[in-house]
Image (cartoon, rainbow, N blue to C red):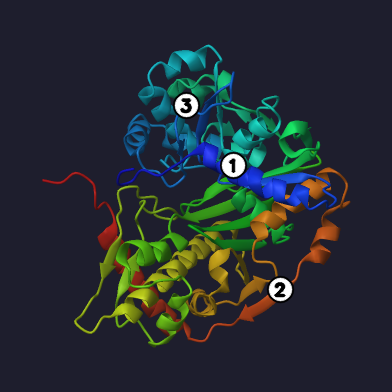
Amino acid sequence: PRPGWVEHDPDEILASQLSTAREIVDGDVRIAAIGIANQRETTILWDRRDGRPVHNAIVWQDRRTTGICDRLKADGWDEEIRRRTGLVIDPYFSATKIRWLLDEVPGLQARAERGEIAFGTVDSYLIHQMTGGRLHVTDVSNASRTMLFNIHSLDWDDDILRELSIPRAMLPEVRPSSGAVGATDNELLGRVIPIAGIAGDQQAATFGQACFEPGMAKQTFGTGSFMLMNTGETPVASSHGLLTTIAWQLNDMTTYALEGSSFVAGAAIQWLRDEVGIIKTASETAALAASVSSTGGVYFVPAFAGLGAPFWDPHARGALLGLSRGSGRAEIVRAVLEAVAFQTRDLASAMESDSGVLMSSLRVDGGMVVNDVLMQIQADILGCPIVRPAVIETTALGAAFLAGLGVDFWQDTNELRALSRSDREFAPGIDDTERNRMHRGWLRAVERARSWDSPFE
């Protein structure tokens, strides 16, 4: 609705899911269970009595709460937030979005304190609606992305709740990622179906990529791009701007991960198409980028919503740098694809430094990985093979895996590992000297985009 603000209509999210579910149910197929993967930090508040949202959902990309975050930092909460939640103070997460809604919607704080208002990420909202209002739950992976959940005690953190004046009564019950939590209302889909898997989208994608062992990593290229590395049963603290998060909880065992988040990946292609108009379809980017051997020194920094890991600068803004009279559509499009790949390199370098594990290859998924040119650019800039799976929508696959385990459709992760198949591997085609030269230019461009909307005289 305005620069830096991103919203969804919760009713539209619900309607899209129900219409899809009804198509499947009407197909008269066997349905063992439902798994839900969702935008994690996206925040919805609704009235417990009738299930109606009190405001549009505030989306993970939204930056309106930068001021609240700045105040938390000024009050010295940086280290405590990181120690307890594994996260950094940033508008990305749900906590300050809740605080903003309680401040801005008249009377909402008092209603929340009376227990009339529920908070949830998209999974919680969908489950509440699909169970006829009977359940208010989430799973540990989603809870760990709110900036309100202690990832060590596995409970909501009362000190953080108190600091932000968020009533604990608003919060959902936290469940494991796999296991029957409830069932759909019979009138909704015409039959009762167990809901048996819940995970935030990136954790679901990691599960769908069968990254079950410590040290295994994946990168999802969607609206943003997200790298997760399984660190096993031990949370690993980052000293390079990464997040410590919960990957999933199965059979009472909690698996942790390191995560790096870049806020803009596929969204930059949408920007080229919808706002700039230099492409008509996303698929054009491959041929355009391949039509030139380089960007001619052009760099694009996609900081439309600030910069995520490892920089964490909510005041950064997008920039297109190094233009000359010879710069054209192809160079700009290639620069956008290279920006996506540079962000991945930054995340991988931070992850290798924190974990002590060098990546021998990187598993990738998400809508953008159908672009062979981008995948080759990624292999060149990262300097290791890129492995694309046969099923690129691994977020949905991971949700299905978790649900299937939850109702004993599959017995264990060994069965799931056997289902994993790769489609193609992309090997690096340039040497270290060239990739390091390109990356130095990227870092110069990032430095010029940082702190751009900070106050100045």
Q: Residue at x 47, y 82 (%)?
A: 432
Residue 426 at x, y percent in the picture: 59, 80
Q: Quadrant of residue 187?
A: top right
Amino acid type, label 1: Ala
User: Residue 422: which disc?
Assistant: 2
Element marked by disc 3: loop
First in residue order: circle 2 vs circle 3: 3
First in residue order: circle 1 vs circle 3: 1
First in residue order: circle 2 vs circle 1: 1
Amino acid type, label 2: Ser
Name above or below for residue 373 compared with residue 76.
below
Q: Which residue is mark 3?
A: 54
Q: Residue at x 80, y 45 (%)?
A: 33
Real-space Cα distance between discs 1 and 3?
17 Å
Amino acid type, label 3: Val
On the question of residue 309 being in view, the answer is: yes
Q: Residue at x 80, y 62 (%)?
A: 417
Element marked by disc 2: strand
On the question of residue 154 being in view, the answer is: no
Real-space Cα distance between discs 2 and 3?
44 Å
Q: Which residue is mark 1?
A: 15
